Amino acid sequence: MSKWLSFLSLLDRKWSAVELYCEDLRRNINFSSQNQTKHVEGETEVHHRPKRGWVWNQFFVLEEHMGPDPQYVGKLHSNSDKGDGSVKYILTGEGAGTIFIIDDTTGDIHSTKSLDREQKTHYVLHAQAIDRRTNKPLEPESEFIIKVQDINDNAPKFTDGPYIVTVPEMSEMGTSVLQVTATDADDPTYGNSARVVYSILQGQPYFSVDPKTGVIRTALHNMDREAREHYSVVIQAKDMAGQVGGLSGSTTVNITLTDVNDNPPRFPQKHYQLYVPESAQVGSDVGKIKANDADTGSNADMKYTIINGDGSGVFSISTDKETREGILSLKKPLNYEKKKSYTLNIEGANTHLDFRFSHLGPFKDVTMLKIIVGDVDEPPLFTMPSYVMEVYENAKIGTTVGTVTAQDPDTANSLVRYFIDHNTEQDRYFTIDASTGTIKTAKIFDREETPWYNITVAASEIDNPGLVSHVPVGVRILDVNDNPPELAREYDVVVCENAKPGQVIQTITATDKDNSANGARFHFSLDEGLSLNPNFTLRDNEDNTASILTRRRRYSRTTQDIYYLPVLISDGGVPPLSSSSTLTIRVCACERDGRVRTCHAEAFLSSAGLSTGALIAILLCVVILLAIVVLFITLRRSKKEPLIISEEDVRENVVTYDDEGGGEEDTEAFDITALRNPSAAEELKYRRDVRPEVKPVPRHHPSSSLDSIDVQEFIKQRLAEADLDPSVPPYDSLQTYAYEGHRSEAGSISSLDSATTHSDQDYNYLGDWGPEFKKLAELYGEIESERTT
């Protein structure tokens, strides 16, 4: 049976293609007239009336041809073809020679390959008839098209599948869910190959699909997510308008129902019971309760409230948004001895309502919760949550500060023992009576040192010491007037030399370590036990300050530069305390506007009109000048003239010997004999300014020649030695000989040896030279008389 269906399907497709092919042939065959004009070389132009012929401008070929022989496409024919084979047909264009071949004699066109319309829909070719002998065209070239005829060889496809889509639960029947679209690659203009029809293969009776548009819709009323949430729907698309033999494709659509608030919350039980011990701490969680809601997400959110009951003031309830549970907390402490149970009515209600489903409500539920208070052996309970006590400073050890009281809250009412937790050093400053709870001092306190103490008192049952309760106790130390007032600071009081009587030179204040109750008012005065101070006085300003005033005009630093003023300060405490302080007042030089210029010894320097900076600059200059002078003198003393001139110095040189004698009395410093007679030089002496390169040869002169030598010969001899000396430098050297020659008959006028040699000179003629030489004449006259004596 399946073979017959396949055969019928193929036959149906072939028959449809043939029908369309014939229809296109009838539609596209045209009759036309062709004017033919031939030119023959050397002949005149001749016009002929052409014959009418068939002109094919469109051919069709079936795609996917699988036959053994080439598929026949069509035939080309020219009016010039007489059937004698003189006309040759030529085919050019797309696929010519490869896909399409032509019989050049008959003009029959065949397709040699299987064509796919989905790849290429048509081919454009050119045909021409030429003379086989001359290869000249008989007609103009003609263009025609070969169209590939479609067959149903492509099944519809869902390009976007599979699909995932949601639709709200409880939607009305016919609610649109999704539109699916299948595409068919076949030619939609020929037949039904691309005409698609949709159908549902899986998902009935919940959903349906429109066969033409592919829109999927709900097919049932009130589809409940809580009953079924997920659906898998299979959609089929079939071409050939759904006829037998058409190709088909399918896709899957996964549909999920989304939640709506169509289910109210419900408590699993109408009555609950909870046990809570009386020792539960205030603010702690004591229990949980939950109402169930079949919805999800925000549709299941709810809020718990206590709507009534005798425990609404003792307990509170809140909602945990993660677990959607009601958390029961304790607002006030429980006391089994006073109340043993509580009853609460708790309501759980949805917070996000959908009024479309209000007929399914109400969307809330109520349950009753009974709370049983459990009896617990509790620690002692203090009558106050904290205590504040007071004690005066300087109180004796053992002074009572205050009393704390605690009781056993249980029905047994056990006795209580008190003690202080010695966790800090301050706890050791107090003691407590273990039976009565009376707190006493253990040291003498100073408020100015520590004004407040914090201790912790504990109480426990005698029968059960493990149960302990604590209470904080603050002890304030009260003030006693035990500190005298004193000056607020050290004052530097200055009075100007040009001060006037009654001038305020300083305002002073005082402080008191005691609090304001014992030292808020200070009184200032001068010491009454001393005589009246003629220089300064004090004025109490009655605002806890006092002013120091001058009592006379002008003060002098040279007379007295420092004054001392005793000041007496008393407070207003009970009993009043006082203290005495001494102010030091310095006398200073001031400007006209009252600004202090200087004090003490600096004032004398300032009177000269020089500032401190100017004085420092002057001293610095003096020091620099002294340093320069000392340096100059030191360099002068240490400087020595070189005896040997540098060999590189080629200038003329004068050697000078600055040897000075010690005066007329100095006869040992220099041998005058060498100056008086050249015969004193016994040997040749080389110059001291050069270093001789040859060893000197000593010369010996007979004593007779030395005695008879003359100064002229002496100088010539020295000149010759200088000219012949190889060790002399290459420049002139001036040598000076202070030779005085032989003793003259008149004798020497030098004063040398005058101390040992008596002169025969008569100096009396000096008295005739006039008053200008009177002193000289007297002097030599005295010398002469001394010689005579």
Image (cartoon, helix red, strand yellow):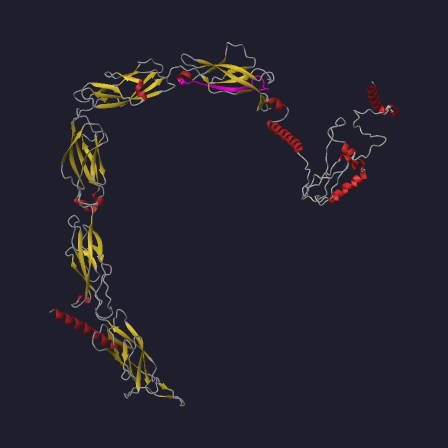
Give whichever of 288, 363 is nearer the camera.
288
Q: Which residue, as the protein is rendered here, is positioned at the far bottom?
A: 43
- Across and down, in percent, residue 158 comes to 22, 61
Residue 601 occupies quadrant:
top right
Give percent across and percent down for residue 177.
21, 55
Say if 148 sits above or below 220 in the image: below
Q: Image point 30% across, 82% down: which residue?
A: 89
Height in image: 318 above or below 13? Answer: above
Q: Quadrant of residue 463?
A: top left
The N terminus is located in which quarter?
A: bottom left
**503 left or right of 676?**
left
Q: Which residues are magenta?
A: 495-516
**Residue at (31%, 75%) from the top-left corner?**
94
- Residue drawn at the location 25% of the way across and 69% of the way down: 189
Residue located farthest toward the left when viewing the structure as drawn: 1
Answer yes or no: is residue 738 visible: no
Quadrant where the C terminus is found in the figure: top right
Residue 202: x percent and y percent? 15, 58
Question: In the image shown, does 669 or 12 lie closer to the viewer?
Answer: 669
Magenta segment includes 273: no
Q: Is residue 348 visible?
A: yes
- Residue 470, image x and y in percent? 25, 23
Q: How many marks?
A: 0
Q: Is residue 33 left or right of residue 351?
A: right
